[in-house]
Amino acid sequence: MSGGKGRLIAVSNRVGPIRDTPQAGGLAVALVDALRERGGLWFGFGGKLAAHPREAVQLDSFEGLHTATIELNTADYHSYYNGHANGCLWPLFHFRPDLVHYRRDDYAAYLRINQRFADALAPLLQDDDILWIHDFHLIPLASMLRARGCRQRIGFYLHIPFPALDLLLTLPNHLELLQQLSAYDLIGVQTPVNLDRLHDCFTHLLGLPQDGNCWQTATHTLRTGVFPVGIDVETFEGFATQPRAVRTVNRMRAELRNRTQIIGVDRLDYAKGLLRRLEAYERFLEQHPRAHGRVEYLQLAPVSRGEVGAYQDFREQMERDAARINGRYSRYDWTPLRYLNSPLSRATLAALYRASAIGFVTPLRDGMNLVAKEYVAAQDPEDPGVLVLSLFAGAAHQMNAAVIANPYDSDAVADALETARVMPLAERRERHAELLKGLHDYDARRWQHDYLDVLSQNP
Ligand code: ADQ
């Protein structure tokens, strides 16, 4: 513990492996950093499912980091995780009501899993702890802890977008969700637009009195704020410049034979805009025959949430579209698109970013998008690549020096690719320097400090 502050209790759906190399750029790094600095505990699901899970909490420690994990019931977990969290809340919060599957049974399981978290966590807490709960899986947790008599400060951070009021209305239990949110002491979101949408719902659906970012509930003052997630810039730069990465970059450049590599890196998720991105790349190839044989698009997309129906359909469509583009444009000595589903180590990923002259990041909706930031951090400042970034990534609020495009307009995205492909070195350097400065100003450490400072203060 440091500076007389209480322990930090970080809570997330999954507790990451603590013995592996830290995941630069990932959320885990920021949390691990905060936990090491303040002292505390990382609490969540440990990964073991069972028909009759053990009640006991498993405690573990490694290099000053303490974790407490629980086992969960298999059937409940599937309804909570694949059902309500990823089959209902995720598409709704990403503006895709057409993909929402709301089921009462799934919602009941979501509440049971949150109750299980609260039952296991409450006895571990000390009076001066502060709790930081992460993401849409655990929205009801503060209200459940309060019902168990916990009086500690409890903050929530939403990593994904917050939906517009009209969309939220389509959720049958939207009032309950807003009431669950109002039980927190602080709610953090990624961008000002998300904050406006949250405020709209508090004003018009809950009718809470507001004073700036403070809201008066029947029991307490709730605060809200914008805290954009950053990455651990130095660690990522380090990955991209270590000798192994340099060898990978050199090998890749030799294979590319002066071709411009475009890189996309996304979990295989419909929100990341991959189908429209392929459409835009095809449009680019149609409109720029001179680029044939001169560009190669590498799309890395590790399979994610493969048990959710919407993800299976989307994966099949991706495979069809990728095959069509290659069938239509490949030559015996050139393949325009390479599409890989395997996950890569952070070091290899950093090297691939650095070997790519264009970072292609065009989600249809994204809380922040850390890939955009990692791509910039991995570039060689003397000869940097260009970031093509969607207007609808939270990152676009901070990264104005990227080439910003509307992912719903495939002509505009094709134009953005061509702008990036022919951009002169001086302009590339200028844009990159500005982007890199932004990454340093709002890195992962700043994010957790800003958030925890506000959470620790009295309103
Ligand atoms: P995600 O939706 O997972 O996160 P993102 O922010 O892009 O999205 O982070 C993905 C992470 O996975 C990146 O660190 C990336 O490097 C890694 N990754 C992707 N493909 C990989 C591969 N093939 N191999 C190895 N690593 C790979 C959610 C929200 C985002 C928000 C973050 C953090 O949806 O909007 O930015 O949380 O708040």
Image: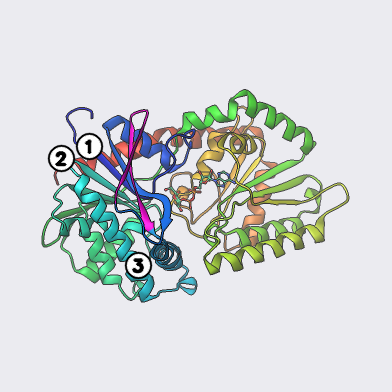
Dominant secondary structure of the residues highlighted in magenta in the image: strand
First to last magenta residue range: 56-72
The 10 Å Cα crowd at callout 1, few under 14, some 14 to 19, many 20 or more, is many
Disc 1 to disc 3, C-alpha distance: 30 Å
Secondary element type, mark 1:
loop
Q: Amino acid at mark 2?
A: Asp
Q: Amino acid at mark 1?
A: Arg
Q: Tell me if residue 70 is in the magenta stretch.
A: yes
Drawn side of residue 340 relative to residue 441, left or right: right
Looking at the image, the residue that sits furthest to the left is 219
Q: Tell me if residue 3 is in the magenta stretch.
A: no
- Could you tell me how many numbered marks the image carries? 3
Residue 7, numbered circle: 1
Residue 128, numbered circle: 2
- Location of the N terminus by quadrant is top left
N-term mark: 3 or 2? 3
Disc 3 to disc 2, C-alpha distance: 31 Å
N-term mark: 1 or 3? 1
Residue 74 in the image: x percent, y percent? 42, 62
Say if mark 2 contacts mark 1, CB within 8 Å.
Answer: yes
> Residue at coordinates 87% horizontally, 46% vertically from top-left?
333
Q: Is residue 360 visible?
A: yes
Residue on which the image places disc 3:
109
Say if mark 3 contacts mark 2, CB within 8 Å.
Answer: no
Which of discs 3 and 2 lies nearer the camera? The answer is: 3
The 10 Å Cα crowd at callout 3, few under 14, some 14 to 19, many 20 or more, is many
Of residues 436 and 140, the one drawn nearer to the viewer in this rendering: 140
